[in-house]
Amino acid sequence: MEWQIAARDNKPFPWTCPFCNHDSIITYSNIYVISANLSIENKHGPKIAFFYFVVCPNPECKEFTFTVSLYDAYLRQPQYQPTSMIKQWNLIPPSEAKVFPHYIPKPILDDYAEGCLIKDLSPKASATLSRRCLQGMIRDFWGVKKSKLIDEIEAIKDKVDPLTWKAIDAVRRIGNIGAHMEQDINLIIDVEQDEASLLIQLIETLIKDWYITRYEREERLKQIVEVANQKESQKK
């Protein structure tokens, strides 16, 4: 990941806190990085692990994240250098799930959080949870309830822009890979981690575009009405 490369090079990088969603620039004063050379002879070759401890600069938050990444490595005197990343573990928090406002329905947030949590272990299961989360959002936000998700998605085709609708239908189709077995049980179609991440990103976008935008709009309108009511009271 780009931010990890910047962190190892002691360069500032943009970062969004997973706890408070505060956007900031992380510098050496907010991050601690150490590495460990795993050079004991083994059949897979030398490895190197990096440990990243990042503290949110937001004074109202100050939460920390802790991430470990494992890389293949080669010896370039006087030290080992990383090549391709083998695996990454988000230990604190345990996933990359964002913290969303309390007014988002809990079942939707639960499916979203679980999809994020299991993404690396089982991308196919994560895609299935994104599909389930999407169906919950369509039923709750648009009030569309049909027996099949494909029919529910078709029912909102005229309510969202064409590209968003295609992306929504893509979540259904990819999620179906995990939800339904192929007729030929020997045909195995996998969902990759980056593909599961894209589905999660779409869920995040829809939560913001549908729920958060609506809530913030309603709050602004309520404020306008309240100001008008106060002015009327002053007249009396």
Image: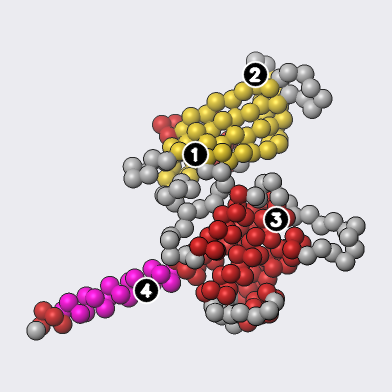
Q: Amino acid at mark 2?
A: Gln
**Residue 218 — which label?**
4
Which residues, given as a range, are shown in magenta?
Answer: 213-231
Q: Secondary structure at mark 1?
A: strand
The residue carrying mark 3 is 125
Disc number lying in front (4 or 2): 4
Disc number lying in front (3 or 2): 3
Residue at left offset 69%, top offset 61%: 128
As drawn, is 168 to the left or to the right of 224? right
Q: Quadrant of residue 51?
A: top right
Q: Quadrant of residue 235?
A: bottom left
Residue 234 drawn at (x, y percent): 11, 79
Query: Disc 2 versus disc 1: distance between alpha carbons?
Result: 27 Å
Q: How many marks?
A: 4
Foreground residue among 5 and 166: 166
Query: Disc 3 versus disc 2: distance between alpha carbons?
Result: 39 Å
Query: Given contact means CB atoms under 8 Å apart, are the residues at marks 2 and 1 in contact?
Result: no
Mark 4 or mark 2, earlier in chain: 2
Query: Given contact means CB atoms under 8 Å apart, are the residues at marks 3 and 4 in contact?
Result: no
